[in-house]
Structure formats: structure tokens, C-alpha cells
Amino acid sequence: AYGFRSVYLNIMPFRLGGKRFRHETELDYLCHLQAVVEILQKYDQLDFVLAQLDETTKKPRAGTSPLIAVPLRLDLTEEQVNQIMG
């Protein structure tokens, strides 16, 4: 994209097609989402991600292996990518 690695965010629903993902309870799921929001705020990406969510008509598709998710690209500097990815 910019001559360096890109970072994408995939947010999965708590359930899709009756199948639960990695969280045992909805509270665990909501706590994880809160942590994601805090990280997006730290890197000044929350508004960028919310705009992508608002504009997309895509949805995750159940019954596929692997699950087809809706990736949201983060608009990060090379330094931020290096901080996140190491």
C-alpha cells in the first residue's frame, strides 16, 4: 500500500450462523470489543474504522471455511505498523 505492511482489522460477531467464536460469554465479547476500541483510539483510527463500517454493505459469511470476514484497513504510518507488528 505505502511501501510497507498493511494492517487490517476483522471484527467477528459473537455468533454467526449459530456458531460462537472465541468468547465464552457475550460479556467476554463486549470486553474484547472495548479493548479494540481503546487500541483504535490510541492509534487515532476509530473514526476511520467507523466510516468504513458505515460505508460497507459487506457482512461476514457463515458456513465457509475459513470464515469469510470483512477486513477493515487501518490507515497507519510505517512507525505505527512497526509498533504493532514488531
Image: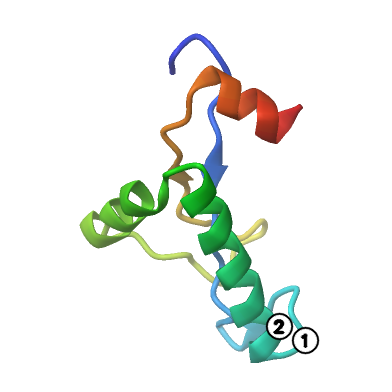
Residue sitting at the far left: 55
Residue sitting at the far top: 3
Residue type at mark 2: give it. Asp
Q: Which residue is mark 2?
A: 28
Residue type at mark 1: give it. Glu
Residue sitting at x 50%, y 9%: 3
**Mark 2 Cα within 10 Å, few/some/many (few <14, many 20+)?**
few
Which image quarter holds the N terminus? top left
Q: Quadrant of residue 65?
A: bottom right
| Viewer-nearest of discs 1 and 2 | 2
How far apart marks 1 and 2 lie (CA) works out to: 7 Å
Task: Judge from the rendering whether residue 57 lies leftward or rightward of residue 15; answer left or right.
Answer: left
Task: Judge from the rendering whether residue 10 lies leftward or rightward of residue 48; answer left or right.
Answer: right
Task: Judge from the rendering whether residue 65 lies leftward or rightward of residue 39; answer left or right.
Answer: right
Q: Quadrant of residue 85?
A: top right
Q: Secondary structure at mark 2?
A: helix
Q: Position of residue 73 (x, y in %)?
A: 44, 40
Residue sitting at x 66%, y 83%: 19
* 70 lies above or below 25: above
Query: On residue 24, which mark appears?
Result: 1
Q: Quadrant of residue 20?
A: bottom right
